Image (cartoon, rainbow, N blue to C red):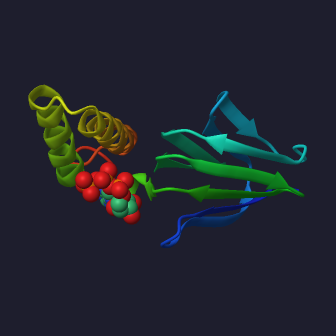
Amino acid sequence: MPLEVHVVTAEREVYTEDGVDEVVAPGIQGELTVLPSHAPLLTMIKPGIMRLVKGNDETDVAITGGFLEVKDDRVTILADAAERAEEIDEVRAEEARRRAERTLEEREDTAELVTAAAALQRSLLRLRVAEMRRRRRPRGPSGPPGV
Ligand code: ATP
């Protein structure tokens, strides 16, 4: 039996699919691979990239942390924030990166620095996921359509 996967945030459903073959997630103790018939599990996940494999289809999701539960071939990820690669607004992520870098250079307050470091990590993650998608599906006259 393949997996039923739900990636949700407090705001929305990010990814809901049946028939998923493999979930790879950034567990707090390292990369976590969930295949069908996995033992029940509840764990925290850290900011990183989640990969969902369904047949020949691979979906990358930028995730900023949360919880992952596996039970009876059902995988539920409750995320702080998550975006599928095609949803990522690269301009926004680039602006967030610049803003965070500026704060890290100019400010001294510890709380501000910690906040900016986390924002920098999120922006870099989003940029990386968007870049991975572009490499996989090149746009332009010679490449396949970037859907
Ligand atoms: P920003 O400073 O651009 O708001 P952020 O890291 O502070 O970025 P979050 O607090 O992690 O943003 O997320 C707030 C909401 O905005 C979430 O719903 C998240 O999915 C969405 N989001 C954040 N950045 C992007 C982006 N670059 N592209 C698409 N959605 C984004």
Does residue 147 appear in this view? no
**How many numbered tags mark residues here?**
0
Q: Is residue 96 left or right of residue 87?
A: left
x, y (%) of residue 62? 45, 47
x, y (%) of residue 24? 65, 39
Most extreme residue toward the bottom, as rendered?
A: 12
Q: Nearer the viewer, residue 103 or 35?
A: 103
Whether 95 is drawn above or below 128: the answer is below
Ligand 1: quadrant of the figure: bottom left
Q: Nearer the viewer, residue 118 or 109?
A: 109
Location of the N terminus by quadrant is bottom right
Picture residue at 56% right of the left edge, 43% below the top = 50
x, y (%) of residue 116? 26, 38
Q: Is residue 54 left or right of residue 58?
A: right
Location of the C terminus by quadrant is bottom left
Whether 109 is drawn above or below 66: the answer is above
Q: Quadrant of residue 29?
A: top right
Q: Quadrant of residue 114?
A: top left
Q: Quadrant of residue 2?
A: bottom right
Does residue 48 appear in this view? yes
Picture residue at 87% right of the left edge, 44% below the top = 38
Picture residue at 46% right of the left edge, 57% below the top = 81
Q: Is residue 88 left or right of residue 30?
A: left
